[in-house]
Amino acid sequence: MYVCDIQMKGRTVLVILVTYFGGCSTNIPKLPPMICGEDNLYGEPIQEGTADIEGFPWLGLLIYPVGTSTPVKTTVVLISRQLVIAAALDIDKYPKHDFRSRARVILGHNRSEGPSIRIKDYTYHPDFMSTTYSTLALIQLDPRPFRDKVIPICPPPNGFDNAQSIYALSLDHDCDNSSMVNVYRMEYVDDTHCREFYRRIELDIETMWPTHMACARALSGGECVWTSGTALVIQDGGKWKLLGFGIIGPGCEAPARFLDYGMYHLWVKRAMSSIGQPAITRLAPNYLILRRTTSNVQRFGECDPEETQLTMYSDRTRIQPPFTFEDREGIVKYNVTLQEDMEYHCIVFRVWNTYTKDNPPEITLRRWCTNLNAICSGFSMLTIFFYVEIIFKHACTFEIVAYGTASKYVDAKALMLYLNSKKVRPQVHEASFKYQ
């Protein structure tokens, strides 16, 4: 890592070099359409009542901590080969000092028999805590050992006939050895009647209302309470498609609230397309966080304890203004280059007044494009530059702390030698050498 000298004349710039390993190509082969929405019901029509979870390979559980007899569980739904959705409030409750390392996702199997998939990262919908607690979390998986066996559910249809049956699939969390899915045939409930029901039972809590909601009730089953993650689905064109994701609360024949997945699917697609791109969070005018990894979903907000386990670089610098008039502003630049072979999970930039609380300094992270043709306006280029401006009136202290890990690469030559050593070679008979 390279740190330039601080210049008190004029401005000082923080330059961040971000390198991506993907190249550009004009001959990109067209990918086959993603297989989705399949089940393991073997042609049998779905029936109300109970069913084995093995019939729905895109439905599963997130368990934490792995390897214990009584883990905490929450329902997840697989919406791509490496992403599941879960209730944001459930994910927020898990301890974050070892969540990625000790949580596992099991899809289409019960806990004792199913293969467990590691978690790579997670992120919350922007509405979480700012608008409502009832929203989605995206969990990024590392499904490489099970890539051929991972089949997601399809996105919602553009439209469907009201005569088509919709179903709610509620997973029973208590059955570790024979996880069962409770299947309910559903009908939609209009928003007015839904809100009136929750006012009547005194569960009309504003912070628990989803920003985008669908309300539905089962045609049978009495009254019950559903945990988060009940999937509202429809079978359309022979494929299962996700309509809604349930939040904890009344269920069965009572009006149940679902996150309208049709309204959240665009956010999911944006999150998928921005995997590996930098993510910047402003927590205060003098407090910024930058994340940059090559293959993780974008995360925003405070650094969690698991992200800050390894410090890659830190520096603290005191900035003294070269003037004595308090009505003048100074602008400082600080130069840094981040190595391209590092995964920077969390980079914290902070600046604060050293002696007074009046007129706190401000910090801004900006894009720096050195090309005259301005071809570096996107984040898909090989090299990306930023710079930080610090605006201050009093003596202040600037701090940067970078947390992360070194990227891991495969030595292609060593890999081929290893594979060749394990390869079974055909036997060559002695007669093969005797040619006359």
Image (tube, helix red, strand yellow):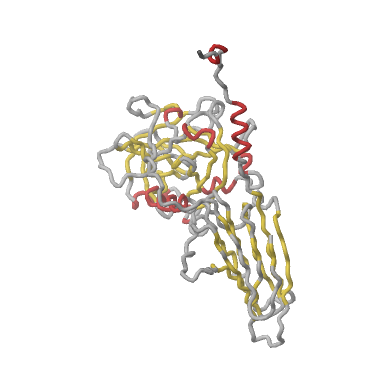
**Left or right: residue 141 compared with residue 196:** right
x and y, in percent, of residue 2 in the image? 69, 63
Q: Residue at x 49, y 43 (%)?
A: 83
Q: Residue at x 65, y 52 (%)?
A: 404
33 or 181: nearer the viewer? 33
Residue 212 lies, with reference to residue 284, above or below; the image says above
Q: Which residue lies furthest to the bottom in this view?
A: 325
62 or 268: nearer the viewer? 268
x and y, in percent, of residue 204 in the image? 45, 53
Q: Quadrant of residue 7?
A: bottom right
Q: Quadrant of residue 102?
A: top right
x and y, in percent, of residue 152 in the image? 43, 38
**Left or right: residue 289 compared with residue 237:** right
Q: Residue furthest top?
A: 431
309 or 374: nearer the viewer? 374
Question: Is residue 197 in sight in this rendering?
Answer: no
Residue 130 lies, with reference to residue 354, above or below; the image says above
Residue 56 lies, with reference to residue 286, above or below; the image says above
Image quadrant containing the N terminus: bottom right
x and y, in percent, of residue 278 in the image? 54, 58
